[in-house]
Image (cartoon, rainbow, N blue to C red):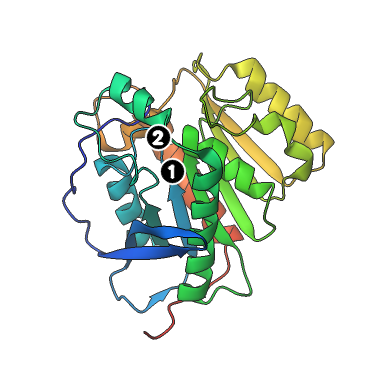
Amino acid sequence: MCHPSENVDPEPLPGALRDEVAVPVRGGPEVPARLCVPAEGVAAPRGAVILATDIFGANAFYRALADRLAAAGIAALLPDLFFREGPLAEPTRELAYARRAKLDDERALRELGAGCDWLRETFDVAEGRVGTLGFCLGGNLVLHLAARRRDLATVSYYAFPAGLPAPKAVGPPREWVDRMQGPILGLWGERDEKVGLANVEEFERLARQAELDYEHHVYAGCDHGFLGGLDDPDRPDRGAAIDAWSRTLRFLEARLGRARRRPR
């Protein structure tokens, strides 16, 4: 499992402001999204990031994560890539997989790309990069975006280098490494049998071979979805979650362009 949780709002974090926005997409309907910004509501000096979720969608886990980014000084856009398919009646694996089977990955990539463009325009980051932060399914999507755009700093959690089977899925990331543009940070758990450590090692080899600006870390003893330990002090992977989140923030702060929100 990745990050199943109720589709509700967590308690707001101090230092983060929330807004509901609509992202325009050429040739399609607007995508509903949550925008979280630092509390002053004027500037995001450390950059702007778009989040790409797992199959459970823009639920409480990801809304809290967007708050965390904003509280750290990074503007965060959380689009609902499943808005056409609708919310899950319950956060079960069976229902989530059934809904994922209906998702058109190419459409999701267009919508994520539109979100990146929207962030560039909204936060005036013409001189720098936009961040992408993806998990599981979203981890694959942001790697695919890195093969299509040159203006991103990519963080991918528990991606599937060998691909994810689904009716409208894009191909496996290992097949387009030579087209990717860095910088890219990949994060995995050592015991993630769904992904396969051999696939992670092959992806690293291909990235080095392509001279990609790439770094990764594999957390010993951790499985898929280990970042869930951020909010659960009783989980054995809590230390790994804290370390991975710290790595993520350091990477984004070092690689993103400064961003200031344009006047409305």
Query: Could you classify mark 2 by the number of other residues whose Cα lies within 10 Å: few (under 14), some (14-19), or many (20 or more)?
Result: many
In this image, 240 relative to 256: left or right?
Answer: left
Q: At which x and y percent is residue 172?
A: 64, 29
Identify the residue position indicated by label 1 in the image.
Answer: 245
SS for dot 2: helix
Q: At which x and y percent is residue 170?
A: 60, 34
- Where 202 falls versus 150 (above or below)? above
Note whether residue 46 is visible. Answer: no
Q: Dots 2 and 1: beta carbons under 8 Å?
A: yes
Q: At which x and y percent is residue 63?
A: 29, 49
Q: How many marks?
A: 2
- Decide which of 86, 75 is in the foreground and name it: 86
Note whether residue 54 is visible. Answer: yes
Query: Could you classify mark 1 by the number of other residues whose Cα lies within 10 Å: few (under 14), some (14-19), or many (20 or more)?
Result: some
Q: Quadrant of the N terminus?
A: top left
- Decide which of 195, 44 is in the foreground and name it: 195
Q: Residue at x 51, y 30 (%)?
A: 158
Disc 1 marks which amino acid?
Trp
Q: Quadrant of the C terminus?
A: bottom left
Looking at the image, the residue that sits furthest to the bottom is 263
Q: Residue at x 56, y 43 (%)?
A: 106
- Where 4 falls versus 199 (above or below)? below
Identify the residue position indicated by label 2 in the image.
Answer: 241
Q: At which x and y percent is residue 145?
A: 61, 48
Looking at the image, the residue that sits furthest to the front is 27
Q: Residue at x 48, y 67 (%)?
A: 119
Q: Which mark is residue 261?
A: none
Disc 2 marks which amino acid?
Ala
> Quarter-wise, where is residue 71 in the image?
bottom left
